[in-house]
């Protein structure tokens, strides 16, 4: 009996020893590598169009060259190749996936872009300001599906909505305080959770038509993100990524650097909770790769011309990031096209081509968006002249002055061939919003006030002005006092502060868009045609339209 007990005790001791030895020699749990694949400001650019990126010249690094980039067929191939490098991957977008889109997407209410991004494997898109161009109900349709009320779209008889998730942590219903879309989503990789917070800029109301954001509040980005950190941590999340539709302006165009970056993103990131690791940004259409406040901060250019490859190494015990890096990659067109995307593009091109390729007129040369010292563009002058031309008649508004917001001009207009011809598709690319013209009465004093509203908190948005209108502004003067009232002239005559003038803008500006709040106080309102139709009529009635080279806005200091 004693022997049996002794043998039993010995076996138990050996078993326990084996367990202890096994634990002592167990290999350390490996760190978890996660790949983020990020884009921003796609704006429905499905076609491989005239989008270029400036890169160092491979044959002479002291010089630069421009290369064609973008197109959903190539972007999808680049994303697929990056996903193949690590099964622990997530594809994200920092907003403006849709809105201000070319005809191939816009004509069908951006359903083609939603379909393309679902096929690409996008996981999360933080809402941007342009997601609200057609209002929150239409944006909800993008997520949930269903046909548009005008029955245009649903090319296959139905629209299922996005397979990815829209995120909107700082967009709340005014009445309830509930977010329009989820504030965040969590993905788990090998037992490690990663949180993704999605937000748009708090100033979205200032850059969207009021009807588009009616009933919504846009909260501060920093306060919103920081409040969500403890909520995520309670769920075991220590690795946190913010997808933010707000950005910055680097001092140079070196797209994998961050030299002298300025703009809202810097102040925002410097105030974010230390638990936040990565900020994928957008809105400014600038490429950069930064370290700010110990956080990785990236932006991938615009229109699908670039993708950011972000690698995170996470400690599985602490669930914290122990290593991170990013690389902005040009979406070159020297890779095979993604066949699924090719089929989608061909389907919608076939539908839109008859309208898109229709020749509408001719111009004498390129109408660029290069900005003068005063803030003018050749394209802006022509667009303002087109607005005035459409509304100057006594039965059309009797307009004397027209203004155009610079952000409403989405791309340059260049002749399609040596004869100078331009197509409707080109005009639509310039004016894709479907805004209508609005003519109103303003006093000279109100005109001066709205001109001062072009500068606000260091942000400059100089309106393009029609022929016959001129003024001088002083760069050295503070906001609110930059324009010399005496310098504001119409056909060479100083305006009278108390006199009334008929002024034409688009409906976005008329309702206070871009911060031009004085237009809201205009009197004797008269609606007009669509902006793109106005531009078409102006180009068609002026064969080989001349380039207006004379400055209308002058600047001092």
Image (cartoon, rainbow, N blue to C red):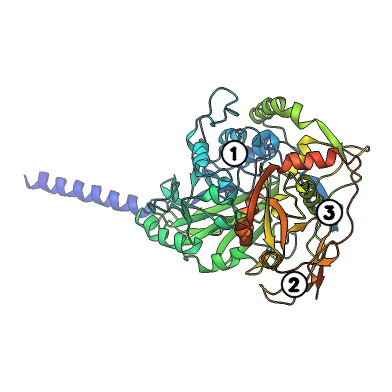
Comparing marks 2 and 1, which lies closer to the viewer? 2
Q: Which mark is residue 276?
A: none
SS of the residue under disc 1 = loop
> Horizontal and vertical percent for residue 547?
89, 50
Cβ atoms at labels 3 and 1 below 8 Å apart: no
Q: In the rendered image, which quarter is residue 501 located in? A: bottom right
Q: Residues within 10 Å of mark 1 (few under 14, many from 20)?
A: few
Tell me the element at label 2: helix
According to the picture, the residue beneath numbered tag 3 turns out to be 378
Dot 2 or dot 1, earlier in sequence: 1
**Label 2 sits on residue:** 485
Look at the numbered discs 2 and 1 and tell me whether their residues touch, using CB distance below 8 Å.
Answer: no
Q: Which mark is residue 84?
A: 1
How far apart are labels 3 and 2 at the CA level?
A: 25 Å
- Name the mark nearer the viewer: 3 or 1: 3
Residue 332 visible in the displayed image: no
**Seen in the image, is 272 located left or right of residue 5?**
right
């Amino acid at each position: 009996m004693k022997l049996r007990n002794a043998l039993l005790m010995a076996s138990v001791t050996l078993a326990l020893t084996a367990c202890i030895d096994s634990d002592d020699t167990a290999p350390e749990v490996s760190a978890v590598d996660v790949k983020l694949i990020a884009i921003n400001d796609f704006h429905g650019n499905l076609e491989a169009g005239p989008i270029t990126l400036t890169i160092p010249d491979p044959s002479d690094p002291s010089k630069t060259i421009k290369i064609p980039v973008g197109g959903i067929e190539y972007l999808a191939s680049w994303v697929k190749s990056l996903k193949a490098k690590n099964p622990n991957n997530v594809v994200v977008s920092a907003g403006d996936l849709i809105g201000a889109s070319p005809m191939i997407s816009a004509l069908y209410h951006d359903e083609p872009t939603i379909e393309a991004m679902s096929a690409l494997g996008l996981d999360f898109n933080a809402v941007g300001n342009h997601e609200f161009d057609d209002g929150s109900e239409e944006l909800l349709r993008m997520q949930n599906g269903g046909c548009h009320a005008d029955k245009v779209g649903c090319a296959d008889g139905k629209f299922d909505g996005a397979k990815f998730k829209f995120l909107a942590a700082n967009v709340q219903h005014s009445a309830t305080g509930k977010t329009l879309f989820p504030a965040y989503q969590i993905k788990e990789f090998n037992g490690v959770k990663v949180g993704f917070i999605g937000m748009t800029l708090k100033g979205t109301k200032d850059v969207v038509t009021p009807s588009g954001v009616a009933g919504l509040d846009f909260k501060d980005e920093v306060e919103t993100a920081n409040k969500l950190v403890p909520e995520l941590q309670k769920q075991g999340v220590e690795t946190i990524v913010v997808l933010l539709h707000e950005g910055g302006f680097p001092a140079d165009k070196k797209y994998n650097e961050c030299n002298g970056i300025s703009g809202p993103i810097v102040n925002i990131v410097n105030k974010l909770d230390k638990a936040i690791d990565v900020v994928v940004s957008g809105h400014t259409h600038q490429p950069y790769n930064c370290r700010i406040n110990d956080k990785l901060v990236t932006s991938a250019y615009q229109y699908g011309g670039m993708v950011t490859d972000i690698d995170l190494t996470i400690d599985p015990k602490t669930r914290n990031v122990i290593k991170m890096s990013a690389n902005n990659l040009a979406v070159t067109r020297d890779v095979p096209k993604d066949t699924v995307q090719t089929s989608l593009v061909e389907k919608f091109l076939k539908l839109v081509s008859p309208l898109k390729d229709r020749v509408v007129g001719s111009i004498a040369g390129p109408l660029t968006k290069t900005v003068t010292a005063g803030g003018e563009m050749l394209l802006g002058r022509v667009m303002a002249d087109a607005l005035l031309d459409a509304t100057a008649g006594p039965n059309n508004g009797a307009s004397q002055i027209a203004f155009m917001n610079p952000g409403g001009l989405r791309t340059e207009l260049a002749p399609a061939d040596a004869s100078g011809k331009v197509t409707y598709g080109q005009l639509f690319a310039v004016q894709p919003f479907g805004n209508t013209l609005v003519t109103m009465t303003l006093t000279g004093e109100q005109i001066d006030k709205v001109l001062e509203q072009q500068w606000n908190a260091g942000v400059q948005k100089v309106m393009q002005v029609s022929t016959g209108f001129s003024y001088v502004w002083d760069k050295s003067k503070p906001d609110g006092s930059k324009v010399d009232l005496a310098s504001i002239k119409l056909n060479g005559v100083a305006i009278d502060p108390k006199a009334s003038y008929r002024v034409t803008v688009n409906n976005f500006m008329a309702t206070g868009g871009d911060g031009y709040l004085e237009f809201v106080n205009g009197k004797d309102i008269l609606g007009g045609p669509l902006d793109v139709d106005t531009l078409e009529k102006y180009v068609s009635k002026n064969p080989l339209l001349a380039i207006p080279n004379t400055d209308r806005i002058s600047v001092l200091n």
